[in-house]
Amino acid sequence: MNCLFCKIVNGEINSDIVYQDDKVLAFRDVNPQAPTHILIIPKTHISTLNDLEESNASLMGLLPITAQKLAKELGFADDGYRVVMNCNNHGGQTVFHIHLHLLGGRQMAWPPG
Ligand code: 5GP
Ligand code: ZN
């Protein structure tokens, strides 16, 4: 499968990895939109939010759990942060391997663009 993030998972493409275990990988976004911008992905390929099934619930629960652990470790959990999951065209998704953005280190605005 020609998936950029699967290639990052299997090491074909280099990335700045901040955390991984057998199920989840977290690495720094190549084009950061905040002082800290990390992408958290399941190691197994799921394309979009639309493709999730009930059986993915525990795996997907690890993404926000990883986000809060990293926010605590990196020191911005108390100040706050944002997690975002874009879906398809209107959501602004550009890489079709599901991922949670973790953005921290600055004041966020609302509504998002
Ligand atoms: P999306 O727009 O799909 O929600 O987010 C995709 C993210 O992947 C973007 O923020 C983009 O900067 C990031 N990205 C795209 N290609 C690469 C890459 O090769 N390496 C890394 N680390 N991030 C990437
Ligand atoms: Zn993939």
Image: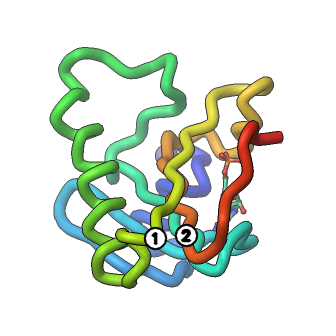
Q: Residue at x 57, y 63 (%)?
A: 103
Image quadrant in which the C terminus is located: top right
The relative height of residue 47 versus residue 63 in the rendered view (above or below) is above
Q: Residue 52's quadrant in the figure?
A: top left
Of the image marks 1 and 2, the number of the one nearer the N terminus: 1
Q: Does residue 26 appear to the left or right of 22 in the view shown?
A: right
The relative height of residue 86 versus residue 99 in the rendered view (above or below) is above
Position in image of residue 75 (x %, y %): 38, 83
Q: Does residue 22 appear to the left or right of 20 in the view shown?
A: left
Q: CA distance from mark 1 to mark 2?
A: 9 Å
Q: Residues within 10 Å of mark 1 (few under 14, many from 20)?
A: few
Which numbered disc covers residue 104?
Answer: 2
Q: Residue 78's quadrant in the figure?
A: bottom left
Q: Nearer the viewer, mark 1 or mark 2?
A: 1
Asked whether mark 2 lies closer than 8 Å to ligand 1, one says no
Which numbered disc covers residue 79?
Answer: 1
Extreme residue toward the right, this view: 113
Position in image of residue 61 (x %, y %): 24, 40
Q: Amino acid at mark 1?
A: Asp
Label pair 1/2, CB-CB below 8 angstroms: yes
